[in-house]
Amino acid sequence: MIDRSDIESAFARLKQAPAGFLRETPLWRLPGAALGVAAAEVWLKLEHLQVGGSFKARGMMNRLLAQPLGEAGVIVASGGNAGIATAAAARALGVRCEVFVPEVSPEAKRQKLRALGAEVVVTGAAYAEAYQACLARQQATGALLTHAYDQAEVVAGAGTLGAEIEAQAGVPDSVLVSVGGGGLIGGVAAWFGQRSQVVALEPATAPTLFRAREAGQPVDVAVSGIAADSLGAKRIGDIAWAVTQAQVRQAYLLSDEAIAHARRTLWQDFKLAVEPAAALGLAALQSGTYPVRADEKVCLILCGANFDPTALA
């Protein structure tokens, strides 16, 4: 389990990253009425504008800066975003990168990986199978393994997003966070603790945290649906499980239809081009799944931009 001190250390370490690698992404503070919801304010953290298109750049660079890097470089298994972040960090630091992606990963993400100089290996129907192949390769090469969501440096790096939100606008009443393997919610919940209500949101077709709570422990789940490429982990990470058990009370499931509708709203009304995984927060508000209060300041994290933009046509 990580805590605020780990995130503060990550924040300091990331200042050593090559100039221009990480961005302080914008935070839009909008009246709830602008999005058709009852909240007093809705904050949109535009993390899809981060290097590599997602929050994962924070954790991957933190991991690479915290560990020795040899000639074999780094290796990762990813549905796309973690691989892109690792490849971008590796290129910035001048080291080799190998990325294992599942067959479900979009071609747009594979092209981005290759453009960043990574060697891309496509294997397995889902992330878990690509991960097992990645582990076997890492044993053979000795490359530094970066995990998409379940390493302390990766989760602490993600938590710097929470620290940045607080520095920009203070502590919101609530933060709605999409969950796959749990790296983002683990970091955000560790940062805010009980000072803000951190809420877990998952597609009903990929309920890793929800099913773990039913079982009382992390369990494997079947994964499918609209956000499977970016929220496609089969099991909640151990770090996220520990943090959310301590800090996150509310968890909700959302339909693919609600997610698609929210994504269209973000594009049509605000020209925000994001992956389905980034739309869960707005979907929870629009559908009434999360019962927002009229006086509430609620923060949504828009966290993915690696997709074929023709999908929004």
Image: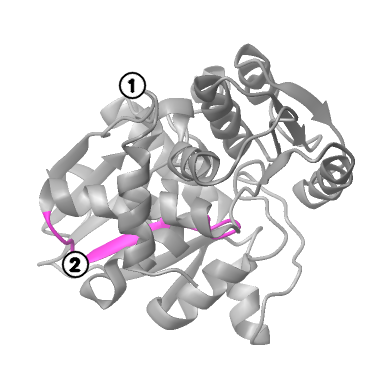
How far is disc 1 from disc 2 in space, using C-alphas?
Answer: 31 Å
The quarter of the displayed image where residue 293 is located: bottom left
Q: Is residue 187 above or below residue 25?
A: below
Q: Nearer the viewer, residue 251 or 245?
A: 245
Residue 66 appears at what percent x and percent y?
50, 46
Q: Amino acid at mark 2?
A: Asp
Residue 303 appears at what percent x and percent y?
42, 41
Q: Which residue is mark 1?
A: 20
Can you tell which of label 1 and label 2 is closer to the viewer?
1
Q: Residues within 10 Å of mark 2 (few under 14, many from 20)?
A: some
> Which residue is depicted at the point 22% across and 54% down?
37
Question: In the rendered structure, which segment of residues is drawn in magenta?
Answer: 170-183
Q: Is residue 151 visible?
A: yes
Does the magenta segment cover residue 236? Answer: no
Q: Is residue 199 above or below residue 124?
A: below
Do the CB atoms of the residues marked 1 and 2 lie less than 8 Å apart?
no
Tell me the tag on residue 173.
2
Q: Amino acid at mark 1?
A: Gly
The quarter of the displayed image where residue 51 is located: top left
